[in-house]
Image (tube, coloured by chain):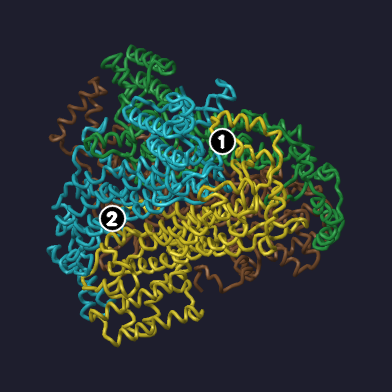
Chain colours: A brown, B green, C yellow, D cyan
Amino acid sequence: MSLIWDKGKSTVNARIQAFAAGEDVMLDRVLFVHDIVASKGHVKGLARIKILSATEEVALLEGLDRLKTMFENGEFVLDERFEDGHSAIEAQLTEWLGESGKKVHTGRSRNDQVLVATRLYLKAALDELASLCEATAHALLDRAEAEMWTPMPGYTHLQRAVPSSVGMWLAGLAEGFIDDAELARMTFQWVDQNPLGTAAGYGVNIPLDRAFVTEELGFARMQVNPIYAQNSRGKFEIQVIDCLCQAMLDVRRFAWDLSLYTTAEFDFVHLPDDYTTGSSIMPNKRNPDIVELLRGTYGVLEGARVELAQVLSLPSGYHRDLQNTKPPLIRAVEKGLGAMALMSDLVQALEFNREAMHSAISPDMYATDLAVEMAARGVPFREAYREAAAQIPNLVDRAPQESLKVRTSPGGAANPMLDVLRARLKS
Amino acid sequence: MSLIWDKGKSTVNARIQAFAAGEDVMLDRVLFVHDIVASKGHVKGLARIKILSATEEVALLEGLDRLKTMFENGEFVLDERFEDGHSAIEAQLTEWLGESGKKVHTGRSRNDQVLVATRLYLKAALDELASLCEATAHALLDRAEAEMWTPMPGYTHLQRAVPSSVGMWLAGLAEGFIDDAELARMTFQWVDQNPLGTAAGYGVNIPLDRAFVTEELGFARMQVNPIYAQNSRGKFEIQVIDCLCQAMLDVRRFAWDLSLYTTAEFDFVHLPDDYTTGSSIMPNKRNPDIVELLRGTYGVLEGARVELAQVLSLPSGYHRDLQNTKPPLIRAVEKGLGAMALMSDLVQALEFNREAMHSAISPDMYATDLAVEMAARGVPFREAYREAAAQIPNLVDRAPQESLKVRTSPGGAANPMLDVLRARLKS
Amino acid sequence: MSLIWDKGKSTVNARIQAFAAGEDVMLDRVLFVHDIVASKGHVKGLARIKILSATEEVALLEGLDRLKTMFENGEFVLDERFEDGHSAIEAQLTEWLGESGKKVHTGRSRNDQVLVATRLYLKAALDELASLCEATAHALLDRAEAEMWTPMPGYTHLQRAVPSSVGMWLAGLAEGFIDDAELARMTFQWVDQNPLGTAAGYGVNIPLDRAFVTEELGFARMQVNPIYAQNSRGKFEIQVIDCLCQAMLDVRRFAWDLSLYTTAEFDFVHLPDDYTTGSSIMPNKRNPDIVELLRGTYGVLEGARVELAQVLSLPSGYHRDLQNTKPPLIRAVEKGLGAMALMSDLVQALEFNREAMHSAISPDMYATDLAVEMAARGVPFREAYREAAAQIPNLVDRAPQESLKVRTSPGGAANPMLDVLRARLKS
Amino acid sequence: MSLIWDKGKSTVNARIQAFAAGEDVMLDRVLFVHDIVASKGHVKGLARIKILSATEEVALLEGLDRLKTMFENGEFVLDERFEDGHSAIEAQLTEWLGESGKKVHTGRSRNDQVLVATRLYLKAALDELASLCEATAHALLDRAEAEMWTPMPGYTHLQRAVPSSVGMWLAGLAEGFIDDAELARMTFQWVDQNPLGTAAGYGVNIPLDRAFVTEELGFARMQVNPIYAQNSRGKFEIQVIDCLCQAMLDVRRFAWDLSLYTTAEFDFVHLPDDYTTGSSIMPNKRNPDIVELLRGTYGVLEGARVELAQVLSLPSGYHRDLQNTKPPLIRAVEKGLGAMALMSDLVQALEFNREAMHSAISPDMYATDLAVEMAARGVPFREAYREAAAQIPNLVDRAPQESLKVRTSPGGAANPMLDVLRARLKS
């Protein structure tokens, strides 16, 4: 049962087969429905140019629909009985329809079949990513608005710097996710091109109606050149991972904030029990496991990206190495979206310890305000800085809101432009 | 002189300083003009809200212009005398203008100063990248058009597969660079937001007119939240590197093709002497060094990206670690654009060995055509495949153009849609 | 069934649980036997200090042996019923033994339980890696010896340079794998330290006999400090991946060689049918898929390493992020050893096309010999080089063996020192 | 002056040259002395086999010594006048000695010249790394011994867990650096093999006495096969970077600890002024910049490793891409050793706030001790756990030392085995 490679226990051939197969067919579960959808488009295209008769078209489309339903219901299980999901479709149709089942593959190669199913998966992933980022941004903006005047320290170098507010912190995070959503939507447009109809990279001697199939499958345009279609294997995948990386960079930063703010030392934020776990040995512990796992997700994506990019050091044309683009892609998408899907609930669940935050604002943190005030009145800044530094021991506590109130520049606490941020979400 | 760290030869303090400084000021040479431009915007903004008098504004703007000219002429050298390029500006203005020179820094922090200069650099890099990709695509399309019917083998797994053409190969590469240019232009829009006016991440108690400065500096919009401005350090940089990576993936594949095609064994392509070097020991050698260096450039970018992403595992707010985003960014941009700048000339310089390409198309490569023809006439594909396989020993040489001529599907040799690809370049 | 994260279909809590669990329990299958072995050591240690009675000890050891047997027979399946493999052991013992089953966990925490099971896995992986590298080196040396005088071109920059031999090529690869084996054995010694007995990173208020357990489990020494034990999570894993990387670098280069040498253009090497696959659409193809998958394996390891290293940007002590070290480790080990296990058979299976190799040695490739001969006779090298270059058009074919015969420096074809390389394998 | 690639301003050829040259000659400054040392060995070897006369040998050795002295004094500057450091040596000797200066290059190629100089550099780097790790471990152990009973909280998940001590924390860090030093010394042995005498990868038709030169240069053994010598380019470099990575992982964790412990919220550690900087805008700030830069160093190394590994996806033999191994190697070594060189002083400079640490140990942190005590007395652990949890509200403050005193297992606070750790340093 050990996966440590057991040489000797199997024949050469069996070992080779096992190595080549990898986890391919299991991964294809996430591509399977996309593959069926694309296959339906291909069937319609073949019927349009009379390669398939109307009867064959109907039978194949019904078969594909049936397979989709059975797969979604769990009646059809994609597993090691099949070499991969792509061949499973043909195999099942042939079992049901005999010779005409095989015709689903006329005029296409497994190469463009994989490409188009993956392309549909990329589009779905980017769409989901954009929606999840937008939902997270909405949740953050709602809470930011409510807490715009709740004081908390602003840090640089993790050192207390100047007064800030919970609302400013959350609005800053929101703006990041708004950018992430926008990037995902831009990238969606970029990858929205149909590779189906390019066969193994050199086209095919059949007059496929690629424009019709492109529209049928909802692509914005055709990926024109067959060699490029092959050469783009992995290229578009990387860009999708990059979009997920952008969102996860923001998730990671937020998780770091929460990891610090939930320590006994900071004690700014409490997490509901759903988000913490106990210790098996220490009765006194509540650990923010989910926050830590969110923080750790970025690494999965970065690793996947490096793995994928290493594969692509190849000449033009298909090579079997390119099969290795699948596992890192799917790992990155599923982990990234899985993390992102937890975010808006988490934002809503945060409980703020307003008292602790307020009392962490020490009087010396007003020194910068003092220096800038003097500078604005015309005192050379170096002199103002020295004067303010000298006054630090004498500074008394103010209401932090006094400091926030004068930050009237656009984006500042007194002018956070939340409406402008919200407007970008609606577009 | 050895850079191997010489402990003992310097005091603790000197070693700390040297470690902290790094190569910072040298790197700032590429940011310096952008910093001056942004400083001019800041000065105008301060004058607008009466923090600077009209006289001070004029003096500062003139000083900044003078510094820019001197820097471009080599009269002002940015070197280790300065902590970094950002402080060099203030230092030089103060030397020239006295107290009012220092006022250039009123209401900004080095944090947003660095951010805005870097942002302008990112925009310039993306614009340059898009232009270079477009120029390369143009060169490729021109040659593709001329060589659309020049036969060459199409490979999969580096094994001869079916007949293809030089034009198809080059048009495929062109389409990649068209996508790369488009991605660079999209990303330009995404990063086109102004961080200036956010100080050290918490705004400032001066009513800066950020909208005015944003327009003055040619940004499409404001980056609103000050904490986000800080948190986006590195985030936008990564996305720019990702764009460069996309172009370099295509450069790398092209370089691989050339590396193979210039071997004695393939002998499909000759490179002009400019692109090769001799060997110091072997009189018989001409080596395609430039092609190999182009191939190697992707790795520099991937390394830079990983370096940069590692830095960003941090809580909100500025940390000194973020200084480490600068070297990988600049390395990636300069190397990536440097490689890209060689491409269009290289494309134009390629000499094709048409005879060698033609004679590499062996008769067995027509077997697929045969099988597909049979399938299109209604023979079940498995049977057609077996029949075609059986006929391989009897296949005689055809004109490869016969095979290309029937690839009439959109994108195929007989319908390469070069006009559609060219149209995307014009938009 | 889609893994694309289905928000809304599950409650917050279920989604959180699913995200946190990941694929953990499935991965633990490769650690499970190691965990049982370590648990037996812990039980013996507890008995030795009288925390367990002799009766309890016997019952627990028998239970652990039974579980191991059942697992290996497939009677006990480790699956999603359990949180992970570590808790499954306690759960099963408790089911069998009641209250005393739980005592297996006295004085240890899941933290050091995971650490010690992983450490045993690392040791097994390194040992397996060393053996596989040695087997591969043996196969290469045997074939090298037989083909030492079989001429083939030596290339630099993929350009034909000077005559070389098949034996030189294979002996060079062998020396790499010998170094890889040695590195794996060195690293084995480095990781051979026992973390068990350090609990959650702060020890435990029970006088565990760690020296006894260390010996019992076959570790060379104790990992002393409990905080270090926690902090080394991921650290040792990375170094093991690095060893696998070294071997895979050599596998990748070998696969590249084979990928080129099996092209129609080079045609130096033929692969048996086991190592190639046909095409579903092209009757004329035999593709070297296994060679390409071997080439692609390095990328999996590099990605895993980056993924793992990203996780480790953390303060001292355990954090849940560290759970994320498991998937990349196991992926790297299983893929790396899986690839390595195919190597020695592949080496034995290669068929050389001696004629093609010989005829690829063109007369100009003797020019370097000529120049060096003149230089050795005292002609200044630049002059000798020019003279040899001038003679290239007149060079006639020699027997390549004449050129090989005079390469008498240690390591050269006439003195390949295969015995010295073999001697390193025996040590 | 902008480095943004200025197309049009230079001819094709000049641009190609600039791209190809890169920063090569500047990087060679760190290799230059090693190259001279290796060249001396090569000269002695040539004299031994009578390729050089005794007179020529003396002249060349004197010339090489003179060049070394001049370089170290700054009288000879290695800059863009030379293609690289390797050709600079020949150029300078020829200027001084005429025709016989050129003879330094007889029987070697630039390929093995670069390899051997780099190999000497790798050895120097590993030796320096080991020494710096040992010095750091010594400093940590000294302070650990003095502070073994100084209480501080032990954290898991950044949550307060159980009482620990400053000594335990520092001893844990020390053990990491001891392992790092050991790994560096092991790796030194692994790379300690001489590639000189293998020319461009196929040996040379001169009977070089490689065994003599190997000993002369202080290598432990010969790297035998010439093809392997070329194929190992980058391979050994990666392993050296991996060693630096291990040390930097430990530096990064230590820096994270300090970054937290120097916050106002934790306030456990104070840094001397040398290690902090002020803010240009905030008079109240002292920022731990050095600690943050130390934390950031790991990323530089990880990026360098990825960059280097990307290059190595190549067939056997030299390719110009391999030139790209130099910048990441040198960057990693210089940055890594630079960071490491700051560590022992930093450790000695830390000031502990014992009061703050003590008062951060809250009464609930004794609950685990309570539960384990009950369990050791035979109470089933789940029951003990519940009982201890129930008592948390009633727990009163104890002296933390009471809890430390009972951690008598090897490695625990009451038995930290510092002598065992120190003994490993002496070996």
- List the residue tagged with mark 2: D178
Camera-side residue of D184 and A387: D184
Q: Chain of mark 1?
A: B
Q: Are marks 2 and 1 on the same chain?
A: no
Category of crowding for the residue at label 1, using alpha-carbon neighbours closer than 10 angstroms: few (below 14), some (14–19), many (at least 20):
many
Camera-side residue of D278 and C20: D278
Q: Chain of mark 2?
A: D
Element under label 1? loop
**Residue B6 spot, x, y in % from top left:** 28, 38
User: Is B203 situated left or right of A420 in this image?
Assistant: left
Which of the 4 image quadrants contains residue B22? top left
Residue drawn 45% across and 45% down?
B306
User: Is D371 situated left or right of D101 in this image?
Assistant: left
Residue drawn 44% across and 18% down?
B72
Quarter holding the C terminus of chain B is: top right
User: Is A199 situated left or right of D397 in this image?
Assistant: right
Between marks 2 and 1, how big is the CA–CA gap?
46 Å
Camera-side residue of C335 and D43: D43
Looking at the image, residue D38 lies above or below residue A254:
above
Which of the 4 image quadrants contains residue A108? bottom right
User: Is B67 situated left or right of C158 in this image?
Assistant: left
Quarter holding the N terminus of chain B is: top left
Q: Which one is in front in this view, the residue at disc 2 or the one at disc 1?
A: 1
- List the residue tagged with mark 1: B281
